[in-house]
Amino acid sequence: MGAHLATFTEAGTRYGYEHRWASDYDPDTCETYKRNIAAVSPNCEVFCGDVRNLDIASLPYADGLVYGFPCNDFSIVGKSAGLNGKFGPLYKYGVEYLEVHNPKFVVAENVSGLTSANAGDAFGQIIKELSVAGKFGYRLTIHHYKFEDYGVPQARHRIIIVGIRKDLGLQFEVPSPSGERVSSRSAIENPPIPADAANNELTKQSQQVVERLKHIGPGANAWADSVPEHLRLKVSGAKLSQIYKRLDPDKPSYTVTGSGGGGTHVYHWEEPRALTNRERARLQTFEDSFVFHGSKESVRKQIGMAVPPKGASQILLALLKTLSGKRYDSIAPSEGYV
């Protein structure tokens, strides 16, 4: 969706992206993609299955590869197995596509923990393989994006690597942050969500959870001093900051996640309840017309694992301008060039 939104017109010529193919192993995600993206990209094919079973050489040629290789083994939440995990090595299938098809550009996205996995060795290896892939190799620009600085109503931080084929003689520059800060209240209430909006079902919560939330103020969590003893969580060890954390209506949301047990659903600042999936989708900057396929929990996962379209579109628009020889305001990349 970020690519679909990234367009500009100059001297009567429209510049933009057309989706050629997509791959994922989650059936609901594939159906969501078909309904919202492939439906407006008539030449787009969707390959639903494990990437390890894909014949990379037979995939259609595209001018660019945009992919988010699985973050499970790079996240700081969990074992952080890195390249030694089940999902960590899957970035190699993107590298293989570069090796075989030599597209003009590559965009790779992952969590901030990518830089520290395997004591930093994983990050170094991934960067090296991307930079030398294919017939020509790629000039890489690596940046730690804070999407709340780009008008996304959510504190969401991600490492994004943009590479342009070296023979093209171009270097991607990080687009300057917009400086626009959008609050969670503004995102959810302005305009009001239509009564018939899809994916807007309420989450069923126990009376105990409702009572606990009544004692938690905006921006506070389950460990607030205002929570009575009988409603406190009996948890040893770290007091995770996002457990039953209510939004601060005047600030961007904290990070929306795709899975997790009780207390991780993101909670309304005033009403004692979890957000609906449509409200979470607004924090991720999906339009209300974007309909997610699957059960309520499946939809929650898809929303939480997505890249905010408003953030992605600014990066991909800058890339489009780079490829078209157009200038734009930029900043130095936090992780440098390779």
Image: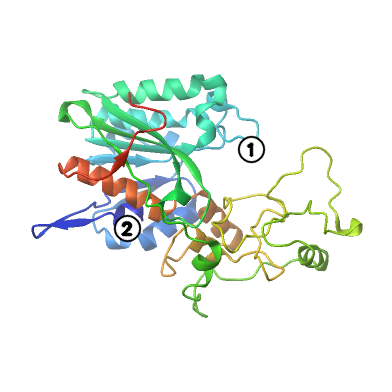
Q: Which mark is residue 38?
A: 2
Near-viewer residue (89 or 273): 273
- Front-most of residues 321 and 279: 321
Which structural element holds mark 2? helix
Q: Residue at x 49, y 56 (%)?
A: 28
Quarter of the figure that contains the C terminus: top left
For this orientation, the residue located farthest to the right is 230
In the rendering, at what x and y percent does residue 144 appear? 44, 37
Check disc 2: other Cα within 10 Å, few if <14, some if 14-19, many if 20+: many
| Left or right of 232 in this view: 25 | left
- Cα distance in 3D space between marks 1 and 2: 33 Å
Q: Secondary structure at mark 1?
A: loop
Cβ atoms at labels 1 and 2 below 8 Å apart: no
Q: Amino acid at mark 2?
A: Ala
Residue 63, disc? none
Per the rendering, the mark at residue 77 is 1
Q: Is residue 195 left or right of residue 48?
A: right
| Left or right position of 319 against 91 | left
Residue 51 in the image: state x and y as whole percent.
43, 37
